[in-house]
Image (cartoon, grey):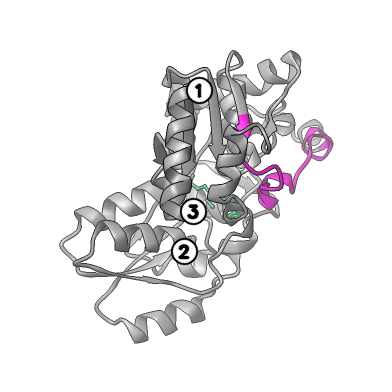
């Protein structure tokens, strides 16, 4: 049944000249029909070079918004409209505007997991793969990092020469993993390397053998000579790696690492978008798009 749905998706996508982009947290069967699978930075750049006029984003809303911001001439669909990122909704424009008024000498660095509306008032965007590099390159030494205080703390530790203020926000999925989970996983798999996403809390990140974005974790595990890995990010990464590297063993750091938003998109949703029966076309007024684009352009320039 899955194979038949996939075949129909591939047929319709070719017939309609559609590009399917999938974040690496998507299920295997979606990754298999995608034109490109990657982390949030790779997806945003890939969308600009895709020759197709229509893009279906299998990921969460801010990722589809990013594609629209960078490629306004394209028709962009979010495959499942309920797929939001709770972290991206945590801080709104009014709150950060107020903060900026009270602290005018700070540069606002926004994780790409933010709404387009909030991006309009930020100075530069970063992703988990580019955050350290971009913060180092910024002229300003006074930075407020939003919304993820865990990624922000990781950046602050890597760039101690700068003053980095953090506000209380973060990914509820990664933040639920504890140092106790690390202790348990290490006891069960004493020879495994621990690879974690910087959205995890410092008590977890500080024990990792490698810290990186979803794609960086995958690349590291594939290139490593080690045979066993504990994966501290959404469960799909361990599943994709197990599929790609059958001679190695991958263990999820915790059963809590399932993002219901990422998992809300199904293969049938993708088929239904192509059949004009589902999905949401991302629309954005030009003023918002141009203002939000400034900080994404800055991310691409510095990253
Ligand atoms: P990446 O930037 O590593 O793709 O992560 C996106 C995300 O939502 C992680 O939870
Ligand atoms: Fe958002 Fe966390 Fe899900 Fe990533 S894992 S999409 S940050 S809720």
Question: Which residue sits at x=61%, y=19%?
Answer: 294
Mark 3 lies on residue:
154
- Between the C-alphas of marks 3 and 2, the distance is 22 Å
Mark 1 lies on residue:
16
User: Does the segment drawn in magenta span residue 80?
Assistant: yes
x%, y% of residue 174?
56, 62
Task: Respond yes or no on whether mark 1 lies under 8 Å from ligand 1.
Answer: no
- The part of the chain drawn in magenta is 77-98
The reply to whether residue 29 is visible in this rendering is yes
x%, y% of residue 220?
27, 53
Mark 2 lies on residue:
235
In the picture, measured across the screen, residue 16 lies left or right of residue 86, that is left
User: Does the segment drawn in magenta span residue 97?
Assistant: yes
Q: Which residue is nearer to you in this view: 103 or 282?
A: 282
Q: Do the residues labelled 1 and 3 touch (CB within 8 Å)?
A: no
- Between the C-alphas of marks 2 and 1, the distance is 32 Å
Question: Which residue sits at x=20%, y=53%?
Answer: 223
Secondary structure under tag 3 reads helix
Crowd class of label 2 (few under 14; some 14 to 19; many from 20; radius 10 Å): many
x%, y% of residue 178?
54, 74
Q: Which of marks 3 and 2 is nearer the N terminus?
A: 3
The reply to whether residue 141 is visible in this rendering is no
71 relative to 210, above or below: above
Crowd class of label 3 (few under 14; some 14 to 19; many from 20; radius 10 Å): many
């Amino acid at each position: 049944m899955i194979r038949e749905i996939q075949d129909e998706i591939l047929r319709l996508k070719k017939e309609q000249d559609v590009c399917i982009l999938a974040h690496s947290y998507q299920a295997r069967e979606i990754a298999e029909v995608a034109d490109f699978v990657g982390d949030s930075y790779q997806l945003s750049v890939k969308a600009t070079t895709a020759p197709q006029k229509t893009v279906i984003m299998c990921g969460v809303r801010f990722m589809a918004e990013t594609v629209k911001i960078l490629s306004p001439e394209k028709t962009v669909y979010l495959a499942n409209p309920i797929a939001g990122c709770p972290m991206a909704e945590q801080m709104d424009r009014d709150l950060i505007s107020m903060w900026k008024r009270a602290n005018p000498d700070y540069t606002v660095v926004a994780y790409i997991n933010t709404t387009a509306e909030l991006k309009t008032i930020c100075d530069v965007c970063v992703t988990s793969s580019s955050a350290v590099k971009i913060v180092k390159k910024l002229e300003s030494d006074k930075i407020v990092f939003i919304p993820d205080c865990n990624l922000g703390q990781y950046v602050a530790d890597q760039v101690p020469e700068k003053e980095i203020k953090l506000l209380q926000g973060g990914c509820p999925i990664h933040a639920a993993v504890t140092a106790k989970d690390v202790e348990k996983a290490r006891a069960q798999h004493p020879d495994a390397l621990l690879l974690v996403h910087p959205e995890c809390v410092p008590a977890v990140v500080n024990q990792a053998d490698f810290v990186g974005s979803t794609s960086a974790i995958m690349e590291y595990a594939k290139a490593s000579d080690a045979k066993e890995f504990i994966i501290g990010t959404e469960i799909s990464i361990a599943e994709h790696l197990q599929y790609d590297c059958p001679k190695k063993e991958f263990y999820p750091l915790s059963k809590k690492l399932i993002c219901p938003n990422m998992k809300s998109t199904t293969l049938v949703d993708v088929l239904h978008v192509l059949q004009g029966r589902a999905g949401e076309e991302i629309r954005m007024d030009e003023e918002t798009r141009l203002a939000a684009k400034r900080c994404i352009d800055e991310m691409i320039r510095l990253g």
